[in-house]
Image: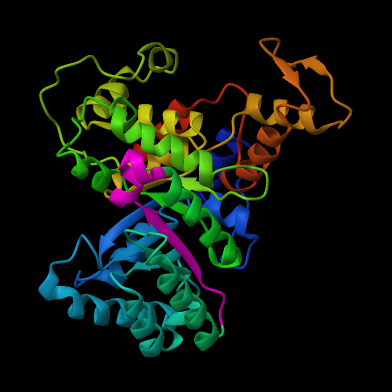
Amino acid sequence: MRHFRHLDRTTLDRLFFQVPQPFGDGDDRGRLAVALGATLYVPATRGDLTATILRRAGEGVTSMVLDLEDAVADDEVEQGLSNAVATLDELAAQGDAPMLLFVRVRTPDGINRIAGALGEGVRVLTGFVLPKFTSGFGREFLDAVTRASELLRKHLYAMPVIESTSVVHRETRDEELRAISQLLAEYRPHVLAVRVGATDMCATFGIRRDRDLTIYDVRVVVDVIATIVNYLGRTDGTGFVITGPVWEYFADHERMFRPMLRATPFEEHDAVLFRQQLVSRDLDGLLREIALDRANGIQGKTVIHPSHVAAVHALSAVTHEEYHDAVDILDADTGGVRASEYGNKMNERRPHRTWAQQTLVRASVFGVTNKGVSFVDLLTALVIR
């Protein structure tokens, strides 16, 4: 698997100083978590699920969740479970995994049943998404993932979704996140990333955020996200990769506020019309939210529409400037400060060292753009093909 593999070689050479490198579910856990990028959720009940996965892989999707929880009605869960198993087996029969594939189950028993029913499909299964994860109920989920790994003789990953009221409510948040942190530490080799369920968090307060706002404008929710990153996203060896919450919108609408995309970068790249297209499809808000995810220590994002994938991946590529700053910072471990070769900032070798290390991991899976190439160029190549 490789990001941007659907672009032709000429386009890759034009865009990238260093092209993205391959990855797979046998990679280092930290690198694989960063490689998730935009994780597309699809109902496990879809009748054309195998064809959908193969088609999306050809369009640049590199991680997908077959959803048996919120996307599936209660009376369709059994059908969805059978369909998920059949799809994984069909994909395995056709060759290597086309992308990183996960199943979001409702209960630990769902993991047991899938593991017991899978045939060759285990070769293309990366792991499970664990919804409404809590310190009280989470161990059952994680034990089920561990047992499934042993049964199927493959290392399977878990991605718990933090979205319960015990985390949202201020009076129980710290105690609950402390307990979740301790629990996840016990199962660290199986925990690929921690996902944030902002939609359920909003539901606690009867909120549905408007498409003119990012999740970072909803204070009661962003306070929760900040605390999750504080407890679970630390870079001292105790934390995990935290992935961004879903952006819910993808259709045209009448706007109340100004678009969130500055016009200047598009004017500089003769892409004013392209900017208008992004705004009309509500992707300006998504782009803004992705940038804020990164600023708040979050990597990758849950997506529910294929049109969102290009935005997440375009903003995940490491710029020429970021890459050279990271290399400069890691060039020595004696501390000190040196001006960036771009002449616009100071690189402090000790405070910025962890950032630089993480940037080079991201560069290995998403590539490094050529000097002068911006997210506008990447988006144009990905969206207008």
Q: Is residue 173 above or below residue 342?
A: below
Q: In this orientation, which residue lies closer to the viewer: 289 or 9?
A: 289
Q: Is residue 103 above or below residue 61?
A: below
Coordinates of residue 77 in the picture (x, y in percent): 19, 75
Coordinates of residue 190 in the picture (x, y in percent): 55, 67
Coordinates of residue 333 in the picture (x, y in percent): 86, 32
Residue lying at 21% horizontally and 38% vertically, measured from the top left:
249
Q: Is residue 322 above or below residue 70?
A: above
Q: From where the camera sits, is residue 110 visible? A: yes
Q: Quadrant of residue 319?
A: top right
Residue 100 is inside the magenta segment: no
Magenta-tinted stretch:
154-173
Q: Is residue 295 above or below residue 234?
A: above
Give the number of marks: 0
Q: In this orientation, which residue lies closer to the viewer: 213 or 10?
A: 213
Q: Quadrant of residue 88?
A: bottom left
Residue 165 is inside the magenta segment: yes
Q: From where the camera sits, is residue 22 visible? A: no
Q: The C terminus lies in which quarter of the figure?
A: top left
Colour treatment of the image: rainbow
Question: From the viewer's perspective, is 45 left or right of 120?
Answer: left
Question: From the viewer's perspective, is 271 left or right of 98?
Answer: left
Question: From the viewer's perspective, is 288 left or right of 240?
Answer: left
Residue lying at 65% horizontally and 24% vertically, measured from the top left:
321
Residue placed furthest toward the right: 334
